[in-house]
Image: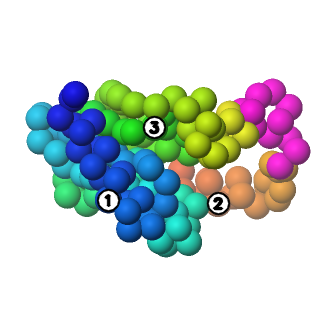
Amino acid sequence: MNKYMRMAINEARKGIRNGHGGPFGAVIVKDGVVVGKGHNQVVKNNDPTCHGEIMAIHKACKNLGTFDLSGCELYTTGEPCPMCMSAILWANIDMVYYGCNILDTEDIGFRDKKFYEMQQPGAREKLVHELDRKACLKLYKEYKEITDKVNY
């Protein structure tokens, strides 16, 4: 077994044994060094965004002092959901290794499939609607005019 996946499993096990949430743990590695670990804390924090990958990204960013995790690899017990995959992409993580897939996750009672279905054509329009675009474009223009910003 891969040592980093073993660490992700142990992180997940710590979370489920403490009642923090589901069996999802993640470890982020850069140049052979663990820079962040996290496990699902949705129940503990009453926050649906506290997935293992998100918690590991938070810790890695804090430990490295950056929002750019280029050069990092993420090991996770479950295939990343769309939210976590988006965070992984925003963080510039180079590679993701996962243990269980979305069907395995569904088999233990999680509803990840619903989120993949929302990515299908026409599904988003039931939930997402444009509003006050002109006012928001004004805000964007203000931001665009700032010369010393970091776009990410």
Q: Nearer the viewer, mark 1 or mark 2?
A: 1
Which of these two is toward me, 86 or 33? 33
Residue 151 showing in the rendered view: no
Q: Which numbered disc covers residue 121? A: none
How far apart, in angstroms, are the residues tagged by discs 3 and 1?
15 Å
Badge 2 element: helix
Q: How is the image coloured?
A: rainbow
Which residues lie in the magenta part? 117-127
Badge 1 element: helix
Which of these two is toward me, 18 or 31? 18
Tell whether label 3 touches label 2 (CB within 8 Å). Answer: no
Q: Amino acid at mark 2?
A: Leu
| Relative to 60, 139 lies left or right | right
How far apart, in angstroms, are the residues tagged by discs 2 and 3?
38 Å
Q: Amino acid at mark 3?
A: Gly
What residue is pinned by disc 1? 14
Does the stretch in magenta take in 39?
no
What residue is pinned by disc 3? 78
* Whole-percent x, y for residue 85 in the image: 50, 38
Eyeballing the image, is 40 above or below 106?
A: below
What residue is pinned by disc 2? 139
Mainly helix, strand or loop, the magenta region? Answer: loop
Eyeballing the image, is 98 above or below 55?
A: above
Which of these two is toward me, 85 or 17? 17
Tell whether label 1 touches label 3 (CB within 8 Å). Answer: no
Q: Residue at x 56, y 72 (%)?
A: 46
| Relative to 134, 103 lies left or right | left
